[in-house]
Structures are given as structure tokens and as C-alpha cells.
Amino acid sequence: MKEESILDVLLYLFEHYFYDDPDAVRDRDSLQNGLIQAGFSPTEINKAFDWLDELAQQRPNVAEPRVGGPVRVYVEAESDRLDTECRGFLLLLEQHGVLDADQRELVLDRAMALDQDEVDLDDLKWVVLMSLFNQPGAEAAFAWMETQIFGDEPEPVH
């Protein structure tokens, strides 16, 4: 079996549990058992749960979006992990109001926490989608990101 990553576990959780039925109550033990049965290692499962816990603790306040603020300057570690395409995509999302500055910082934090040497654009899109999922007031942004990932012809941002 190929070595799985935190993102592999998160994507499996999102696609098989959270996305289809977000209101279903599941405890961590049942989720962990399902992931082990799917072939994921306990170490990666625990890292994924830690990632989700951090996401839940850092939920930005979307009541007062701040669009059009200063440009974000990336530190070397962020630039090493997120290529120009990823950084440009985040800027695009912020300029079009899909992400505000606080949400961008949350996405950056979660992308850096993936424990990967590089995060490609597809991985980053998933991080954005998972970060917007269940955020009050972010339903339109989530729907737009969903079309970016699943749709053949994404609609332009308005």
C-alpha cells in the first residue's frame, strides 16, 4: 500500500463522512475504526484528527469580512511549500471575496500543517474547501469552491 498522507485521510473523511451527511453524529472512535478498516495508519489518522481540531479552534469570524486589505507577504517556509500558482490562487480568492484575510490565514495555517514538502494547487483547493465547510456565512464561498473542484466549467466569481 502506498504511504498515505494527512491530506489522504482528510479527503477520505470529507468525501465519505462529512460531505454526504454533515449532520450525522459520529464519534471519533467510530470514525477512527472506519479509517483503519479503509487501510489508513493510526499515526496518519491521529495527525488528521489533530489537523481538524486545529481547524475547529481557529474558525475566523465571518461577520465582518475584510476584502481589499493589504497584500500578504509570504515567509520563506510558506513560499517553499506553496508555489506561485497556489499563492496567486489565494490572492484571486481574496480579491473576489471568496476568502477574507482571516479565512486566508486559516487556509495558510492548515496548508502548512499538512506535513507535506509541497502543496500543489489541487491540494490547496481541497484545504480551502474543507476550511470553508461548516463556517457560518461561508455557504456561497463553499459552493463556488465546490464547483472549482467538482465542476467541469466553474462559474466566474461575482
Image: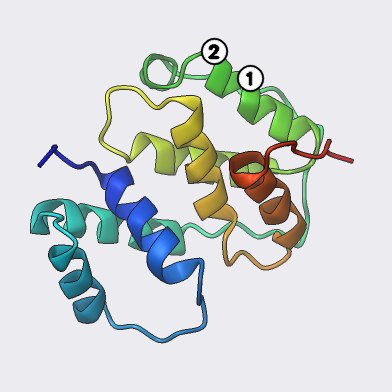
Q: Would residue 73 be seen by someone viewing this image from the given angle?
A: no
Mark carried by residue 84: 2
- The residue that label 1 is drawn on is 88
Residue type indicated by callout 2: Thr
Q: Residue at x 37, y 34 (%)?
A: 112
Between 77 and 42, the one nearer to me in the picture: 42
Quadrant in the picture for residue 149: top right
Mark carried by residue 111: none
Q: SS for tag 2?
A: helix
Q: Residue at x 13, y 38 (%)?
A: 3
Residue type indicated by callout 1: Gly
Q: SS for tag 1?
A: helix
Residues at marks 2 and 1 touching, judged by CB atoms closer than 8 Å: yes
Look at the image and name its color scheme.
rainbow
Q: Can you give x and y, in whole percent of width and height, for residue 44 in the image?
A: 17, 51
Q: Which residue is drawn at 27% across and 23% down?
A: 117
